[in-house]
Structures are given as structure tokens and as C-alpha cells.
Amino acid sequence: MSSNKGVVVLGSTGSIGRQTLDVIAQHSDRLHAVALACGTRVAEMEGQAARFGVQHTAVGADAALGLIGLDDADIVVNALVGSAGLRASYETLAAGKTLALANKESLVVGGDLLMPMAQQPGQLMPIDSEHGAIYQCLLGEDPREVSCLWVTASGGPFRGRTRDELAQVTASDALAHPTWTMGPKITIDSSTLMNKGLEVIEAHHLFDMPYERIQVVVQPQSAIHSMVEFADGSVKAHLGTTDMRIPIQFALSYPERWDAPVEPLDFRTLGRLDFAAPDTDTFRCLSLARQAGAVGGTLPAAMNAANEVAVAAFLRGDCGFLDIPACVEAVMSSHDTQPVESVDQLEGVDAAAREAACRFLSSVHVA
Ligand SMILES: NC(=O)c1ccc[n+]([C@@H]2O[C@H](COP(=O)([O-])OP(=O)(O)OC[C@H]3O[C@@H](n4cnc5c(N)ncnc54)[C@H](OP(=O)(O)O)[C@@H]3O)[C@@H](O)[C@H]2O)c1
């Protein structure tokens, strides 16, 4: 790999993609963009390509796959949204390139396939701030001495609400996230706590940790990005400013650390750090995701597809907030779980679960 690494940005027009380009611009002596892919905002991507001198672009997840094998592509940032990103993660690892992974759905759906392919240290770098935090807490540690991972959660915009109150909330209420500005799908997932459920499954795969040793704790200030507890009771926490460019940069700079143009955390003005247990009775998606993860096999893929369909329907105003967990639960209960075998198989499971989710949503919303 040359000292100036070539980066493919899949999902360059999204929240993570744009911030990845910010990091590349900031470190043009160490990184350059070699290819970009997007879904619909083609004019914006062309503007990015012109600004960064990028010659290769693609529209759509299938076309994006063609960028991974480019000779000067050292790192692929997978910032696509949803299970559409699975094959890109797979092809990146199969090509022996570094995968900087924001697309958590890849690991939720295909962790059993992807993790055995990522055997070189640093070949699969998480971009999710929680997993980046855990990754850093584990550096230099013996994994056998880890007793528990603590994944922190902001609690989302509806923390403290009752189920009756949640029945009335709209997509625009849910899009007002208290601490992070993100794409619409992950913002809704944060408000249902499904995002934390997906992250628990992601942590299970990335760090080879049994589910009973992965805890979720609400930390409303989002200053602690996650923690690792060790056999002697010591706990290491990762703190920092809530700016996704920091975990994105770490995924690209590892094993080095580079300067970042972000305001450092000022502990004198931080005031307080609060902690609480998540309300899993009201926000059922977290428990459903844990359940899917614990059963394993193809169930997380079915669960994830149902969630994607329900979230898209909620964003369009076609279903209520509480229909999201109801849809996920209905699809999970009718799924015939099999061991994971291949990307083709998982794409089939994804498609069938999407159909089941659509049938469920149309049955509860018959005009
Ligand atoms: N945002 C965050 O702070 C954050 C933090 C941690 C993890 N993540 C994860 O990072 C991923 C991306 O999140 P995001 O918030 O950046 O989402 P986003 O703002 O919605 O961006 C998604 C990107 O993917 C592109 N895209 C979607 N479907 C595509 C397809 N079929 N083919 C090609 N491109 C496609 C979109 O293109 P167009 O917009 O042009 O259609 C856009 O560039 C998600 O898995 C999310 O969970 C995000």
C-alpha cells in the first residue's frame, strides 16, 4: 500500500460519505478519493467527483461493486444504508482490501460470512462510534480478560415516553435526534432503539463476544462512546466530542492517529455524565434484535429486512411508530431460521422477509 492511500467511498452523498470526504480533504497528504458511489443524488456526487479529481463513479449498489477492484483502491468505506451494502462488504474483504465499515447492516445480516474473511489485523475497521470506541479500548489488551462490553446509547428523542405517547409520534418528531445528525434510516432506528439492537449484533460479530456479555446503557450526553470491562473489574471508557469525523478518521488512519479539526471535549464544562438502563418494555426493537442475534443463522437478516421495510413505511407516513416493532416481530415469528451459507442465500432471505413485512403492514392498514 502506498503512503497515500486510495479510498473508495460508497454512499458519498450521505451523512457518513460526506464526512469521509471531509476527512480525506483534511489529510490529502495521506488519503485520496479514487471512486465514489451513490443511490439517487447523482448531481451531488458529480460535484464531489469534480472537487476531488475522482474519475470513477457509480450509481446503485450493483454498479458500486465494480469500483472495489480498482487497482489504486486500498480502502473501501462502505457508507451505504441497509442490507444493500452486504455484497460490497463481502467483495471488499474477498479482494483483500481494507473495509472501513459504517454499513452495520452488513454485519447484522452477514457477520457469520464476513468475520472469517477479515483475518488480518485492521482489515475490518468499524466506523460506528461505539465500535470504534470498543476497538480502541481493546488495543493492547488480551481478549480473554474482557468480561463485558458496554455499548452506550443516547436513548433517542423519545426517551422517557410511554407506549401511548409513542403511538402518536410522526417521522418529523423522530428525525429530531438529540445528539447526532445522521441519515433518515439510522435516525429512526435510534428513536426505536433498533439501532442499539443492530449495534449489539455488530459488536457480537466484531469482537467475538457472547450476547450475555454485551450490555447497553443509556448515556444521554453521548460523551462516552462505549466501554470495556475487564476480569479485574477495571473499566476502560472512550470519550470524545460527538463528531463522526473522529471515528471515520480513526478507521482510515489506523494504526496511526492523526490530528483532527474538531473541538476537544472540555471536561470543565461537560458538567455531568448520566447513566440509565434502556427501557426495553417500551422500545421493543432492542429486545427483538437481541433475540434475533441470540438465535442467529438467517434470523437477523429477516429481522433487519422487516425493520428496513417498516422504517421506510414510517418515513413515508404509511404506518405508525409502534408498527415498526410489530412488523419486525411478525416477520421474525414466521421466519424459518437456517444456518448462514452464502450472500445469495442471505439476499433471498432479505427479499422474502421484505415481502412478508409488506404483507404485514398492509394487513394492519387496510383502508
Ligand atoms: N450517519 C451517521 O452518523 C452514522 C453513524 C454510524 C453508522 N452509520 C451507518 O452508516 C450507514 C450510512 O448511514 P448514513 O447516515 O450516512 O445514511 P444516508 O445519509 O442515508 O446515506 C446513505 C448513502 O448511501 C447511498 N445509497 C443508498 N442506497 C444505495 C444504493 N442502493 N446504491 C448506491 N448507493 C446507495 C445514498 O445515496 P443517495 O443519497 O444519493 O441516494 C447515500 O449516499 C448506515 O448503515 C448507518 O447505520 C451512520
Image: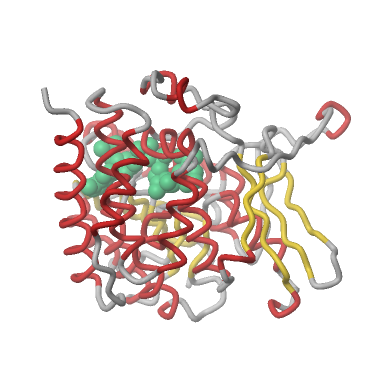
Q: Residue at x 24, y 67 (%)?
A: 336
Visible residue check, residue 20:
no
**Is residue 318 rendered to the left or right of residue 255?**
left
Q: Residue at x 30, y 56 (%)?
A: 332
- Which residue is at the front of the view, 162 or 50? 162
Q: Residue at x 49, y 48 (%)?
A: 286
Q: Compared with residue 270, is residue 94 higher up or lower down, i.e. above or below?
A: below
- Which residue is at the front of the view, 178 or 126? 178
Visible residue check, residue 166:
yes
Image coordinates for residue 92, horizontal then vertical, percent: 34, 68
**Is residue 30 rendered to the left or right of residue 182?**
right
Image coordinates for residue 307, horizontal then vertical, percent: 32, 45
**Which color scheme is applied?**
secondary structure
Image coordinates for residue 1, horizontal then vertical, percent: 48, 72
Number of callouts: 0
| Quarter of the view holding residue 280 | top right
**Is residue 83 rendered to the left or right of residue 183?**
left
Q: Quadrant of ligand 1?
A: top left
Furthest toward the left, the residue is: 367
Instruction: Quadrant for the C terminus, please.
Output: top left
Image coordinates for residue 238, horizontal then vertical, percent: 73, 51
Furthest toward the right, the residue is: 268
- Which residue is at the front of the view, 249 or 184? 184
Q: Compared with residue 311, is residue 258 higher up or lower down, i.e. above or below?
A: below
Q: Residue at x 49, y 81 (%)?
A: 119
